[in-house]
Image: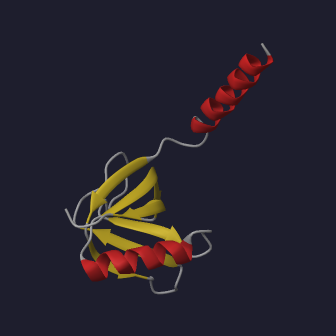
């Protein structure tokens, strides 16, 4: 009985954790541009595909703030993706930073 209770409690914790946070959206495309902005405010990534589920004016450009905890990792993955022309998954919650889509995470693919 105790094992069943512990298993149910653990499963409940996983289910609660998966529901936390905003709804996340993803788009896969190839990078066409990487930039820092005029004031080095963060990282701008431009894809060859438009993002969805947002009201941003520039759906192909994503922005990651300079003080984001994954800034260096994101820049490194983005440079690898651009240099090797590999597809990149970008993850966002649908909010905008100016005209760009606010970026939260990335992942890279091998060539298809």
Image quarter for residue 62?
bottom left
Residue 34, image x, y percentages: 36, 80
Residue 3, image x, y percentages: 75, 21
* Residue at (72% x, 17% y) in the render: 4
Direction from residue 96 to residue 110 in the image, left or right? left
Residue 104, image x, y percentages: 50, 60
Residue that extends furthest to the right in the rendered view of this protein: 2
Q: Quadrant of the C terminus?
A: bottom left
Against 18, is 50 above or below?
below
Q: Quadrant of the N terminus?
A: top right
* Residue at (39% x, 59% y) in the render: 90
Against 36, is 59 above or below?
above
Residue that extends furthest to the top in the rendered view of this protein: 1
Residue that extends furthest to the left in the rendered view of this protein: 112
Against 84, is 96 above or below?
above
Image quarter for residue 32?
bottom left
Direction from residue 88 to residue 97 in the image, left or right? right
Closest to the observer: 94 or 88? 88
Asked whether the viewer can see residue 99, the reply is no
* Residue at (57% x, 37% y) in the render: 18
Residue 76, image x, y percentages: 46, 79
* Residue at (36% x, 45% y) in the render: 53
């Amino acid at each position: 009985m105790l094992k069943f209770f512990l298993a149910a409690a653990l499963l409940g914790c996983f289910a609660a954790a998966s529901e936390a946070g905003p709804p996340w959206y993803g788009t896969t495309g190839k990078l066409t541009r990487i930039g820092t902005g005029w004031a080095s405010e963060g990282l701008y990534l431009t894809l060859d595909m438009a993002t969805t589920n947002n009201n941003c004016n520039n759906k192909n450009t994503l922005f990651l703030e300079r003080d984001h905890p994954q800034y260096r990792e994101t820049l490194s993955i983005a440079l690898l993706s651009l240099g090797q022309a590999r597809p990149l998954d970008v993850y966002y919650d649908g909010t905008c930073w100016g005209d760009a889509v606010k970026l939260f995470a990335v992942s890279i693919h091998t060539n298809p």
